[in-house]
Structure formats: structure tokens, C-alpha cells
């Protein structure tokens, strides 16, 4: 009996071990904890990383930034540029069993346009109406030609949510998001984890090789890397540039990178509530002086070991949209002091909130030291990232070190930040001429004409500086050597199609 019992126990243990070995559970370390998991309400970069596994979009991009099908399989424009017709993928269901069809697309766009809390309004503003022209075909009628629309559909404005779930949950949708992506939502513990499970009925399920994916917010880059090396993570995003050489030299790890579409800068509260009424927010010369006090090349070398690109615009200098007539300024402390005197100040106190991760903190400490030489007494307010964004949206800040992950179309890096009613215009900067120029850039498919409009807007913004741009990052990932099939994208997203553990 004892022999049989022992044999049974050993068999059970072996079966359990085999099942554990077969389970493919991916763990990804994030630099921040996402905000609300509702594509219409959210704004964080890390939230978009989670959405890449949770919520499919109408279209996607290639690593070369070409627009390609996802939930829409084909599309065409009318000759006047006022109608976009899309054919939709058949046989797709949302995680709650609701069918994905033309009615679902119409419901999603209507929600983005009309929900009071929607941050996508400015992104889909050109859509006058959505017509269901067939069970799996929709026609978007625009109020003016919009060269940016497909680019918007490659991001949160194109993410499709279950209309059954949105109707039932309203603004609480983010507590239990239901989309149509490769993974379904399981649970979220704030500041700890977000767990997703493979969706068995996913239309492209054969390309998905993990049973679960768990996102773990770990703000400290050193701790993230230590967790990867210890086997507690399988992948991490935004490896510190100072650790790049070490990861490249570690035969147990894989290094991957892609040049970013985005930027990092300091957003200034110009007119967002009572805290916008202060010298730094009211006087452009003080913001110009602050910008001139900074040596962007030195920041890149000291903090990022030269891996990133100094910047002063929404686009890097390698972009065709970069305004060469306003290059990255050289540091000029004397000129900065002169501008401060013209504004009536010898010294000025400025509070800048910064995310509580070591890299951004170190970068702002360098900025703090440089600005001090021109007379700025910079106080750094370290905050958890979601709280930082909440205060920024609510106007409870003077200046905020924050970035943007970048968009395929240039409009996505500037319009919603700089137009009077832009969905993410947290500075509440408002200049009717900038609105006119940025709106004009949306209506033309002539790249040269669009460039003229952006350059004219930049000439104004270079003076007003509601955002003081600092640099353009390179996305860097570190992966356990057992992972294969990962492709880095310039939008920084982690796409898990065809990614797997080595056999």
C-alpha cells in the first residue's frame, strides 16, 4: 500500500510539474502604473502598452510606420476627402461575447465624441457622422478633410470597446475593460499588477503563445532590471540608458531598441485654474529664460550617456516635420538672466512636479542645477505618476515634467496639447492663430502645405513656450534570453503576436 501510495504521489507531482511547465505566463515590468483602463478617458503611455494586449484597433502600424489592417481590413477615401469607407473584419467578438460589427464601430466613435470625460474628442473632431452601410462596413463623413484620421485610428481613438459593456458601465468601464484584443482582463491591484488571460476566441489566436500576461509597475529602473535578472520578470520596458551596455554584454538577456516618436519636456500651467496665475505661467520671457538656462546636450550625456536626442520641438531633428528655422538652442545663461530682468525678476521660485522614478528625478536634478545659475530656484515635487497626471489635468500644479510617447502623424504630437480645446491641453494655453494653423494642417493631404502650417505655428510656440521641450528618448527593452519573436516598434508598444518562450 505504501509503495502504491508513494507511486501515486510521485505521479501526481510529476503531472503537476508538467502542467506548470506547459503554462506560458509572461511577466512585464512597467516604469509606471497606468491610469484608468478606458481608452476614451486614459492618457498614460503605459496604459497604451496594456491596451496593445487588451484592445484591438481599427488599424495598426508596421515598424516602418505604415498603416496596416487590424479590425478594419480595407478602406478608401472619396475624391473630395470627406468620406472614409472601411470594411470590417468578420467573425470577431468582444470578450463578453458581443459581436464586433459596424454598429459597434458607430457606438465607439459616438462615445469618443460625446462622452463628457472623453479625451479623444479632439482626435475625432473631424467626424461629422458615422453611417452603417453594411453589417461589416462603415462610412465616416467628415466636416473637413482630415489627413490625421487613420493615424488616430491606429491609437486609442481606434480602439474598439464592447458597446454592451460601455452602455452598462458608463464612466466606470475602466474597472473591468472589455475589448476584443488577444487577452481579457482578469484583475488589477493598483500599484501592484494588472493581469490578463488569453482570449480563446480571438480572431488571431494562433499568433498568441501566452496563457496570461501580467504587467507589474516598478518605477525604479535598477529594481526592474534586478527583477529581470532574478527571473521575476520576463521583459521590461524603458531600460535605463546607463544599463544598456550591461544588458548587451549579458548572454542571458536580450537587448532591443527603437527610436521614439515622442518627447519629454516641462509642461507649464499657463491658465489652468488659480495656480496658472503666477509669473512663470503669465510671462513667456521667463519660460524662454528657463529654456536658455539648459544645456540639452549635457543633459543627454550626463543622464542618458548620449543615447537620446536633445530636443526643442514636438518632433526630433531627424523628423521631416522638424522646423529647422528654430534649432535646439545652445545654453546661454547671460541671455537667460537678461530675459529675466526684462520680465522684472532677478530670481524666481518654480515648483516642478516629477514622476518618482530615478531616471526622471536625476534628469530634473540636472535641470534644477542648470536653471539655478540663471536665477531660478527650482523645487522638485516627486509624485507617483498617476497622481502627477491627475494634478496636472486638474490644474493643481505650476510646472510638470512629463512626456508624450509620440504618434505616427505629426498632428498627434501637437494639436491636442496646443489648441484651445485640445483634449490634453493641461497648460490651458490658447492662441486663436495657433488653432487656425494647426486646424489647417489637418485638412490638407499636401505634405508641403501641412509643413508650412506647422512651421508657422511653431514660430509662435517658440516664443510662448507652454511646453519646454527637453529631449527625445529611444525606447529600450530588456528581455530574458528565453523569449523570441519580439519586434521593437517606434511607438514603444509591446505587441505579443508571435512572441513566445523558446521550446
Image (cartoon, rainbow, N blue to C red):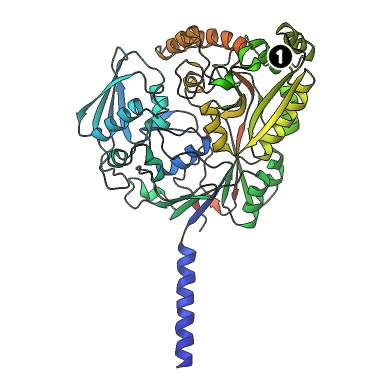
Q: Is residue 115 above or below residue 248?
A: above
Q: Position of residue 453 (x, y in %)?
A: 49, 9
Residue projecting furthest to the front: 274
Instruction: Count neighbours of disc 1 (C-alpha within 10 A) and say few if under 14, some if 14 to 19, many if 20 or more.
Output: many
Horizontal and vertical percent position of residue 52: 44, 40
**As drawn, which residue projects farthest toward the bottom?**
1
In the image, farthest residue toward the left: 134
Q: Going by the image, does 252 lie left or right of 160? A: right
Examine the rendered structure and indicate whether residue 393 appears above or below residue 246.
above
- Which residue is located at x 61 percent, y 39 percent? 238
Residue at image position (34%, 47%) is: 202
Q: Where in the figure is residue 297, as x and y percent of width and height? A: 73, 24
Q: Viewer-proximal residue, 489 or 422?
A: 422
Q: Which corner quadrant of the image does residue 378 belong to?
A: top right
Q: Is any part of residue 103 visible from this angle?
A: yes
Q: Is residue 476 left or right of residue 67?
A: right
The reply, left or right, for residue 399 in relation to residue 205 is right
| Figure quadrant of residue 59 | top left
Check the picture and name the quadrant holding the N terminus: bottom left
Residue 214 in percent (x, y) is at 49, 51
Quickly name the residue at label 1: 289
On the rendered structure, is 259 left or right of 199?
right
**Can you see residue 314?**
no
Question: What kind of element bears circle 1?
Answer: helix
How many tags in the picture?
1
Amino acid at each position: 500500500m505504501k509503495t502504491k501510495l508513494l507511486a501515486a504521489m510521485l505521479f501526481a507531482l510529476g503531472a503537476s510539474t508538467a502542467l506548470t511547465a506547459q503554462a506560458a505566463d509572461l511577466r512585464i515590468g512597467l516604469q509606471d502604473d497606468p491610469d484608468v483602463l478606458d481608452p476614451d478617458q486614459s492618457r498614460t503611455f503605459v496604459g497604451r502598452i496594456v491596451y496593445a494586449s487588451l484592445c484591438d484597433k481599427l488599424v495598426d502600424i508596421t515598424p516602418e510606420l505604415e498603416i496596416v489592417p487590424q479590425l478594419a481590413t480595407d478602406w478608401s477615401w472619396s475624391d473630395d476627402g470627406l468620406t472614409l469607407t472601411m470594411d470590417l473584419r468578420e467573425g470577431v467578438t468582444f470578450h463578453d461575447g458581443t459581436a464586433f460589427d459596424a454598429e459597434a464601430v458607430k457606438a465607439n466613435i459616438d462615445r469618443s465624441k460625446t462622452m463628457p470625460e472623453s479625451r479623444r474628442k479632439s482626435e475625432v473632431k473631424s467626424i461629422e457622422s458615422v453611417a452603417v452601410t453594411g453589417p461589416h462596413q462603415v462610412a465616416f463623413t467628415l466636416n473637413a478633410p482630415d489627413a490625421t484620421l487613420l493615424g488616430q485610428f491606429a491609437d486609442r481613438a481606434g480602439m474598439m470597446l464592447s458597446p454592451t459593456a460601455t452602455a452598462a458601465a458608463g464612466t466606470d468601464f475602466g474597472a473591468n475593460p472589455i475589448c476584443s484584443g488577444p487577452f481579457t482582463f482578469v484583475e488589477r491591484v493598483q500599484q501592484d499588477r494588472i493581469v490578463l488571460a488569453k482570449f480563446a476566441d480571438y480572431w488571431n489566436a494562433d499568433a498568441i503563445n501566452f496563457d496570461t500576461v501580467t504587467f507589474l509597475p516598478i518605477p525604479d529602473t535598477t529594481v526592474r532590471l534586478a527583477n529581470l535578472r532574478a527571473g521575476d520578470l520576463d521583459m521590461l520596458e524603458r531600460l535605463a540608458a546607463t544599463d544598456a551596455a550591461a544588458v548587451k554584454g549579458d548572454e542571458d538577456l536580450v537587448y532591443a531598441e527603437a527610436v521614439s516618436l515622442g518627447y519629454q519636456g516641462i509642461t507649464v500651467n499657463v491658465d489652468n485654474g488659480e495656480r496658472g496665475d503666477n509669473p512663470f505661467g503669465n510671462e513667456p520671457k521667463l519660460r524662454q529664460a528657463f529654456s536658455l538656462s539648459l544645456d540639452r546636450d549635457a543633459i543627454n550625456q550626463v543622464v542618458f550617456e548620449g543615447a537620446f536626442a536633445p530636443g526643442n520641438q514636438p518632433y526630433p531633428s531627424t523628423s521631416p516635420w522638424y522646423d529647422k528655422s528654430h534649432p535646439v538652442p545652445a545654453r546661454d545663461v547671460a541671455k537667460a538672466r537678461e530675459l529675466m530682468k526684462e520680465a522684472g525678476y532677478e530670481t524666481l521660485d518654480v515648483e516642478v512636479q516629477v514622476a518618482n522614478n530615478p531616471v526622471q528625478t536625476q534628469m530634473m536634478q540636472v535641470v534644477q542645477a542648470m536653471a539655478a545659475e540663471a536665477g531660478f530656484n527650482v523645487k522638485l515635487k516627486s509624485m507617483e505618476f498617476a497622481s502627477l497626471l491627475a494634478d496636472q489635468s486638474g490644474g493643481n500644479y505650476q510646472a510638470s515634467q512629463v512626456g508624450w510617447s509620440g504618434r505616427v502623424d505629426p498632428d498627434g504630437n501637437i494639436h491636442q496639447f496646443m489648441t484651445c480645446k485640445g483634449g490634453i491641453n493641461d497648460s490651458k494655453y490658447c492662441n486663436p492663430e495657433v488653432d487656425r494653423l494647426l486646424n489647417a494642417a489637418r485638412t490638407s493631404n499636401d505634405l508641403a502645405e501641412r509643413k508650412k502650417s506647422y512651421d508657422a505655428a511653431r514660430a509662435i510656440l517658440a516664443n510662448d513656450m507652454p511646453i519646454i521641450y527637453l529631449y527625445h528618448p529611444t525606447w529600450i527593452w530588456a528581455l530574458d534570453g528565453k523569449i523570441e519573436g519580439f519586434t521593437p516598434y517606434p511607438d514603444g508598444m509591446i505587441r505579443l503576436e508571435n512572441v513566445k518562450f523558446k521550446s
